[in-house]
Image (tube, grey):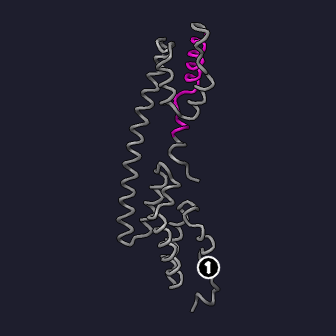
Amino acid sequence: MREHPAQRDRRSLPNFVALNAAILFCASASRADRPGDTLDSVRLQQLAERGQFAQLRTILRHHPAAADPRAAALLESLDTYLAHQREADERRLESFEKARTEMREKLAAGKLEDALRSAVAMHDLADNPAALLASDQMIELTATAQRRAAEAEDAGDWLAAMLLYSGLRNMPPTCWPSFTSNAPRRRSRKTLSH
């Protein structure tokens, strides 16, 4: 199963040991300096684990312990991480738009196998893959590919049918719920030889 890019980013988070140490430091510093001004380290850790670094950064930046060099180093690391994340998001968006343009061009040219490949790339790069799959263009693409694959199969053009079915199989299953029941039908050798 393909992994969504956001899931890959979550695996490459800043060093959690250092992050947890800084969060616990900030929490203990706030308790030691001002008993009434506690920083909820559990909440900060949850924000970090969910990848909500912008919110974590905002909370830490306005906390009295932010003046400490260790907290300042953490904030600098978070700023760097967020800047890299923005750059990665921009590159992903550019790649998504390129794949979208390619898919439209290939679909208009009748090159369904290539259009399906571009659609898979779009799905992998999308902010909201479910909304992309529900879009009219994706529905049209998969329906056209299913129809042409069935036509090619009925005409005995097994190569064209196989290429289209293969392209459809690379798409997420929600794109083609009826596809599994319409997969290539096995025909007897007698039918194939005539």
Q: Amino acid at mark 1?
A: Arg
Residue beneath the point at 39% across and 58% down: 100
Q: Where is residue 83, by image quadrant? A: top left
Q: Mark 1 — residue? A: 185
Please provide the residue range marked out in magenta. 9-31
- Judge by depth and name the residue closer to the eye, 139 or 5: 139
Looking at the image, residue 171 lies above or below residue 90: below
Is residue 173 in the magenta section? no
Q: Where is residue 37, by image quadrant? A: top right
Label 1: how many residues lie within 10 Å, few (<14), some (14-19) or many (20+)?
A: few
Q: Is residue 159 visible?
A: no
Residue 133, horizontal then vertical, whole percent:
51, 59
Q: Secondary structure at mark 1?
A: loop
Residue beneath the point at 38% across and 72% down: 110
Q: Is residue 177 visible?
A: yes
- Judge by depth and name the residue closer to the eye, 166 or 64: 64
Residue beneath the point at 55% across and 48% down: 3
Q: How many marks?
A: 1
Is residue 19 in the magenta section? yes
Residue beneath the point at 63% across and 80% down: 186
Residue 165, horizontal then vertical, whole percent:
53, 70
Residue 107, horizontal then vertical, whole percent:
39, 68
Left or right of 98? Residue 165 is right
Residue placed farthest to the front in the image? 36
Residue 130, horizontal then vertical, whole percent:
53, 55
* Quadrant containing the C terminus in the rendered view: bottom right
Main secondary structure of the magenta stretch: helix
Looking at the image, residue 134 lies above or below residue 36: below
